[in-house]
Each structure stands twice: as C-alpha cells, then as structure tokens.
Image (tube, rainbow, N blue to C red):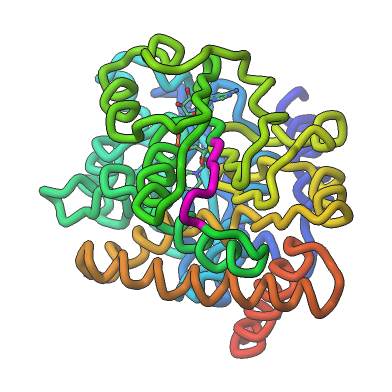
Amino acid sequence: MNGVCETNKMEIMIRSLGDELGPFKVLWIRQPDVSLEAFVVVDNVACGPAIGGIRMAIDVTVGEVARLARAMTLKNAAAGLPHGGGKAGIVANPSLPSARKEQLVRAFAHSIRELTEYIPGPDMGLNEECMAWIKDEIGRVVGLPKVLGGIPLDEIGATGFGLAISAEVAAERASLDLHGARVVIQGFGAVGMHAARFLAERGGKLVAASDRQGAIFNADGLSVEKLTAHKRSGRPLQDFSGAVSMSGDDLIGLDCDIWIPAARPDVLNEKNVSRLKASLVLQGANIPATSGAEQWMHENGILNVPDFIANAGGVICASVEYHGGTQSQAMAAIEDRIRANTSEVLKRAEEAKCTPRQAAVGIARSRVEEAMRYRRYR
Ligand code: NAD
C-alpha cells in the first residue's frame, strides 16, 4: 500500500514538473538484492542523447533530479552541443566504503544499460574512478580518467576557464577593466580556484575567497598560486597567512568588481542581495541566486551572467571527450561557445530590457524547440 501511495505521489510530482519540453523518460530503479534505489530523468533528447551527471546523496529526490535534468537540457542547448539533458540520483551516502560504493555504481550501470538516450557523467559524490566502473559495465559514460581517454576537466579547470572567458565579454559590457579588477570567490574548490587562476592571467586581483569553514581577505590581493597549493594540501583557507579572516557571510558585502559564487545554491537571495557591491556577478555554481535576487541585480545595475551560460565549460569538455576530441579541442570549444553565448545573452537582455536569465532561457528553449521540430514525436 505504501509503495502504491509513493508511486502516485511520484507520478503527480513528475507530471507537475512536466511541460512541452519534457521529461522524455523517468526511470525509478529499485534493486533490493543490493539495496539500490536510484532515479534517472531524461528530460529532452531532441538535440541528441542526454548528457548529465549522477548525484549520489542520501537525500537526493526525483524532484531535484528532474529540475537538474531540465537545467542540463538548457545548458547543453545553449552551448550548441549535440546532446539533450538528463540527470540521475543514487540514494546513498557518498562516503560509503569504496567496495560498497563500487557495488552500487556497477548495479546502477547495469540498470541503465538499455537506456541509451542517457549518457551519465560525474556529479556531487561521484568521481572519475566511478565513471571508470560504469565504462567497464556498459561503455557509455563521460568524465573518465585520463588513462581511459578522459579529459580531466577539474584538473585542467574547464569550468573556471569558461568563467574567465565569460568575464572578458561581460566586463566589456559593464565598462569594467579586467586588469586590476578586484575578484571575490565564494567556494575555493575546483571551479573557484581555476576561475581565480584564469582571471589572474587576465590581470584580475583575487581579494577574498571562502570555503565551507570561512573566508579570508587581503585588499592588496592574494597569491592564487600559493592559495591553491594551501587549499590542495587539505588545510582550511582561514589558516592561510597574509590575509585577514572573516565570516563567510561577510563576503557578500565586500567592496569589489567581480563576485563569483562557486559553491552552493541560492546563496544570493532576497535577504542578502542588496549588500552586494560588485558590478559583475559570474555564476560558477548551479542555481546560486534566487529569481528575486536576479531581478534585484537587474534593477540595480549589477550585470549577472547566469549559471548555464557562464559555467558550461565542464559539460562542453565532457561532450568533446565523448566524441573522441582532445584537451586542446575542448578548450577551444569552451572559448568559442562561451564567448559567443555570453555576448548573445547580454545583448538580447539589453535589447529586450529583461534579465540575462530570461534572455538565456529564451535562447536555449528556442534551440530545443527548433530541434524538436525535426523529431517524429513532439
Ligand atoms: P568542489 O567540491 O571542488 O568545491 C566547492 C568548494 O565550495 C569547496 O572549497 C567547499 O569548501 C566550498 N564550500 C562549500 N560550502 C560552502 C559555503 N557554504 N560557503 C563557501 N564555500 C563553501 O566543487 P566544484 O566542482 O568546484 O563545484 C562548485 C559548484 O559549481 C557546485 O555547485 C557544482 O555543481 C558547480 N559546477 C561545477 C562544475 C565543474 O566543472 N566542477 C561545472 C558546473 C557547475
């Protein structure tokens, strides 16, 4: 009886999320013999088989997976990739012992063997090694280790590089000189540290950064190289010498030119957005600002480049890997597409007097709708 109620609730929820774009398929996987519970949402495949990561978390829900799958449809279409959007969730603790994690990931891979419209990749809780297990089971995956033909996107900083390209275009629109621009980064991880590095190469000055434990600040600039080495050694940012410690929350009100959220969702919201002093916000994390916060930035002259335009470097890299391309081809594709997309989105937003996100969603949706016209199903 409980199972029936749960199924009904799930059906109602999925239907409420659905619209003319998707979802195309929803798969709910239960394998009691290995205690596997997982979901796959293939949102839309008009542009090609869906690419999107697998999130492993104890509290991941099919609703969250469906929203992330839609975000991938828009991100992949905006980036001009021959791929639709999808996402998967495995309900489990990502810190499981490796052997148990491998059992779950391999069982999950078996369950999606016939779901050829979905190409899995890494997301929160899963890494390149997990992708290698999937490759071993079914052959269809992105985000592989180098030795298996993968392009190590977090090692080379694919997403951070894309953010710096987006910054070049947006800075020009905001009449901001990147040389000497003061940069603040919330979340000095794979995305944040590479964004800092590529912006420093363009003359940007990192004045503050944070991690889960807190934030540090130095008005004269922090050495990105030294800070990266410090962070990679496993120490919290606040132990870095030559900087003042502050609370993570204070980062929002710092006087700066470019503010980059590169950690959690909804960190810029109706309660705190008015404290921002930056002239440009580049969204490195997924959904880091609420729609109210984006509207406030729009009305108050802060240029804001939305996540699926600015942070598409990772998935562009994954797509190049899947199609057998090289690392330098991936970097060239990231530069090409993010430069063109940032420019088009900001131009359209200005012309239509709408937010950059409204312009970006409009562009991405119309690409998906155009692709759907070539398909038998509508
Ligand atoms: P990561 O785990 O390497 O780094 C995240 C960093 O954020 C860590 O330093 C962590 O300490 C810090 N952090 C966590 N909570 C925080 C908080 N409340 N305040 C400040 N810092 C906090 O992750 P990542 O790969 O850099 O991804 C960061 C974000 O970007 C995620 O939202 C991810 O979904 C998104 N994203 C990543 C990629 C990619 O290529 N890795 C691509 C697109 C989007």
Image location of residue 368, percent across then percent down: 64, 76
* Residue at (42% x, 42% y) in the render: 196
Residue at point 80%, 32% (across, down): 275
- Using residue 130 as the reference point, say whether residue 58 is left or right of it: right
Q: Give coordinates of residue 118: x percent, y percent.
A: 46, 59
- Please, is residue 308 above or below residue 233 in the view? below
Span highlighted in magenta in the image: 178-184
Tell me if residue 98 comes above or below residue 112 in the rendering. above
**For residue 239, what is the image quadrant?**
top left
Measuring 66% from the left and 86% from the top, which residue is drawn there? 370
**Whether residue 21 can be seen here:** yes
| Residue 120 in view | no
Which residue is outermost to the left? 147
Spot the residue most to the top: 239
Residue 85 position within the rendered picture, expressed as x and y whole percent measured from the top left? 55, 61
Quarter of the picture containing the C terminus is: bottom right
**At which x and y percent is residue 120?**
41, 51
Q: Is residue 377 magenta?
A: no
| 75 sits to left or right of 164 | right
- The residue located at (53%, 35%) in the rendering is 185
Q: How many tags in the picture? A: 0
Is residue 182 covered in magenta?
yes
The quarter of the picture where residue 191 lies is top left
Q: In this image, 376 relative to 99: left or right?
A: right
In the image shown, does 43 or 138 lie closer to the viewer? 43
> Hey, which residue is sitting farthest front in the picture?
220
Q: Nearer the viewer, residue 1 or 288?
A: 288
Q: In this view, does 109 lie above or below 243?
A: below
Quadrant holding the N terminus: top right
